[in-house]
Each structure stands twice: as C-alpha cells, then as structure tokens.
Amino acid sequence: MSTRLETIALRQEDDVVHSRQAAREIGALLGFDSQDQVRLATAASELARNAFRYAGGGDVVFELSPGSGHLDQPQTLEIEVSDKGPGIADLQRILRGRYVSSTGLGLGLVGTQRLMDDFKIDSAPGKGTTVRVAKHLSSRRHFTEAELKALLQRLNSAKPRDPLTELEQQNRELISAMEQLRQKTGELDHLNQELDDTNLGVVALYAELDERADFLLRTSELKTRFLSNMSHEFRTPLNSIISLSQLLMDRVDGELSEEQEKQVMYIRRSADTLLELVTDLLDLAKIEAGKVTVRPNQFVVAELFGALRGMLRPLLKNPNVVLTFEEETNLELFTDESKVSQILRNFVSNALKFTEQGEVSVTAQAGQHDTVIFSVCDIGIGIARADQGRVFEEFTQIDSALQRQTNGTGLGLPITKKFAELLGGSVLLESEPEKGSTFSAIIPRVYSTSIERQQNESGTAAAPALRDVSPIVLIIDDEEIFRHVLRNLLRASNFRVIEANGGANGLQAAESRRPAAIFLDLIMKECRAKRRCKA
C-alpha cells in the first residue's frame, strides 16, 4: 500500500509556498536530481495555487506508492491536490490547450501535465476537483520500510521556511534555469553553424558530383564516337589478315607444309575471334551513338529460318545437341531482316554454348498487338532469378563451369536487347537453374516509323556491264594490303582488275575506263586530312 509522506491544508496564501517547499524537500530525500526537484516543486505549487485561487482552499497530499522495484514498476511519488470548489466547466478544452482565460486558468494544468510522468484529473461543475500527478523513481532505488520511517522523521523534524526564503530559492532556480538555457542556446547556435558548414559542404559535393557526372558523360560520348568512327580502321586490317590467311589455305601461291597449314589455321581462328569481338564493340558503340540505321524490308519468317539453318550449322559442334526451327504458317514482317537475324543468331549461339545435350528450338508465332514472338528455348544449365537481369548488362558473364570453358565478351545479349528496342520491340527471359532457358524477342510486324517500303534491291545499273566480255573492276583504296587481297580473290574470275590508291586517281580511272563495278574505300587518309570525303 502507499505510504503517506505529508499533508498540507490550503487555508492561506503561505500554504501554497509550503506545498512548493515540501515537494522540493521530498524530492531531494527520495533521490530525484535537481531538475526533477524543480519540476515537482513547480507542479505542486501550480496545482495548490489553482485550488486556493479558484476553490478557496483544499488539501495537498504526498504519497509514495510501493511499486515492485523492477524497471517496469518502479516506486512512484504521487501528489494529490483536491478541493470542493465549483469544478471546471471547460476541462477538455483546457487540456487540449484551446481555452483562453484572462485569469490564466488552465495554464497551470497544461504545464503540470507536461512536467510529470502521470496526470489524472476528475472535475465536474459543483462537485470540486481532484488532480493526481506522479513522478517515477529510478528503478535502481527502492526504499525499504525502515528507510521510509527515517524519511518521515526527517520530514517531521524539518522546519518550514518563510516565504522570503522560498522566494530566494525560486530566484536561484530561475537563475540556474536561465544559465542552462543560455548554455543550450549556445550549443544550438554551434550546432546550427556546423549544420550550415555541412550544408555548404554538401552543396560543394553535389556541384563536384555534377561536374564529374558531366565529365563522365562527355568521356562516354567521346568513347562512343571514337569507336563508331574507327569501324573502318579496326575492320580493314582484320579483314586483310583473314583474307590473306584464306588465300594461303587455298594454296593460291603454292603448297603449304603441314606445320605451315597449322600456323595459318591458328592465325585465321585468332583473327575470326578478334573480328567477332571488334564487331560486337563497334555494334554497341554505333547503337549508343545513334548511328545504326534501320533498313526495313518485306520478308517471310520461313525464308529467314531457312537462311539461319545454313548459317548456324557450323556452331553445331556437339553431336548431342539438336537445333530445330518451327514457325507458324505465312508469318510475314516488314522490318530490318538483318537485325532480326542477328538477334536470333545471338540467342542461338548463347543457347548452344550452355547446352551439353538435348534440343535447342527456335520458334516464331504471332503475338498480341500485331507482333511476332521469336523464341529460342534450350534445356541447358539455366540462369538463377537473381542473375537474370544481369545477363543483359554489358560485359557481364554469369560464373559457371560451362562459362569458364567458352569464349565470350558479355556483349551478345546486351546488343540483342538494344537491337530489339531499336526495332520497337523488347526481350524476355524465362529461366530456371538446371532446367533451361527461353529467350524471346517480341518484334512488331511492321517497323513503326516506316511509311513507304524501301526498295529491296540496289546497284542494278551495273548488271548489264558485268555480262560483257572481260569486264573491268576498279579497286579504289589507299591500303596496299587490301588491294592485294582483292586482286588475288578476283584472280580466278574473268574480271580485269585495275587499281587506284586515292580518290583523285580513282575518279580519273572511273571516268576513263568506265568499270562495271567499283570497290571503294569510303574513308581514306587523304579524305580525312582534307575533311571533305564524299561517299
């Protein structure tokens, strides 16, 4: 049960002061710190003043509730102030802070509610008012019965101080509170200054990040333009290596020894691998630079699949894997056939790399919204869900035992995705580890920006001349190696080959000799130097 510590009857103005003194002294004896002592004294005096002013008197009771000594139920100092006055008519408005009184009624109640841990009030017009507030003791402090008896003796022996002494004490508390407020204000100013400095640092950091981002964007654009413009410089020497090695393999200039044939074969294989890498890089750079042109033409899926069968046959090196094609009847599209073909080649190449046995099937069927769905399905190693988004990122390869056995740049699928989007479509992936994958490209049947179909054939004007006896072929190229390769490739034909090592010489030869066909290097050194190359 609760232990009553002190009772003060409110009969005169000095009793309000005694209530404040008693609250501070009891708080000190119970171990409350100085701030809580001030809170207790302020709450007791405000409640006592309200009772005396508005009800003409009342009683102030201080009690210590037992609790349990645990953290969730500590001992509690309770202060109850009761009166038999007229009660409070606007209690709820006062507690919500919406009641304004010229006498200050309500400010003491709201302030006390904020100062204490618990606050309860019972009031009704004509029945008086009872307010009970409480402040919890520290869970580490629990007063025994003997300690409470000693505390009561000290309270009974304490002499009440006069109002002037209490006023001096209040002044000291006010000065202490003002000093603490000054210190807090100084700390707040310091924190505001630090915050301002931090904001300036953040602004500077964002400005630097924006500058870095702009620099990286310009660098990326420069890289893209460089790669797209270097297509000729990259491919010409590679094509020369491949063509020269093919001439050697064909024994155009004599027989090769077994060791020479092996070395030439290695040269050709390495050049093919390097050309594939360069082609992927240049395709990606051209797409990013917006230099890829879509050339739509009318074609039938069955004919596309027929051409793919022949092109993909060299990839079927594993006898345990079967490649099949299946399409709906009479599927016809008007879009860029070469890019659709490259999309499917990349899908099939990827599927064959990661399928050790079983079937890789290529299908085409009509989709919604006038589209055609091209799908390549395999029963290979599959791709985990967490990695399915990564396979379409540039230079990304998912680590696996088969991946380590195959060559690749991680560009095939990203290029495929960009080509599909370029044609107005999209790609999808459905996969499950150890069960296989299905890559799909959803392509619109008609390329969206096409209004009129472009002509499917070009350059037919030279066809009659090609039927003449010993027609002339003109090679215009500043690269001697490339002219040598072309001349040897045409050696077995009935063409007469003439050469020119520059644009001016080539134009003169074309006007004077009227060749049936011209092999023309579009970007030559003299044109790049003069910045006036014309195709």
Image (spheres, helix red, strand yellow):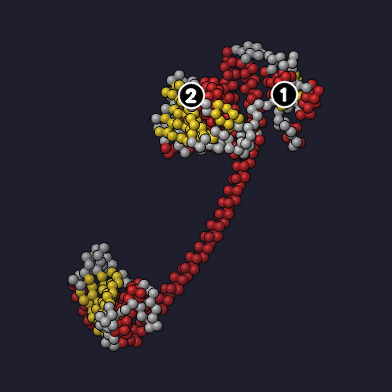
Q: Which quadrant holds residue 504? A: top right
Residue at screen point 67% across, 18% down:
489
Q: Which residue is mark 1?
A: 461
User: Relative to 107, is 204 above or below?
Assistant: above
**Horizontal and vertical percent position of residue 35:** 35, 73
Q: Which residue is mark 2?
A: 325
Residue at screen point 64% across, 25% down:
239
Q: Badge 1 local density, few (<14 within 10 Å), some, or many (20+)?
A: few
User: Relative to 211, is 49 above or below?
Assistant: below
Q: Amino acid at mark 1?
A: Ala
| Disc 2 secondary structure class | strand
**Horizontal and vertical percent position of residue 200:** 55, 60
User: Relative to 376, is 114 above or below?
Assistant: below
- Most foreground residue, 177 or 526: 526
| Disc 1 secondary structure class | helix
How many marks do you count on the picture?
A: 2
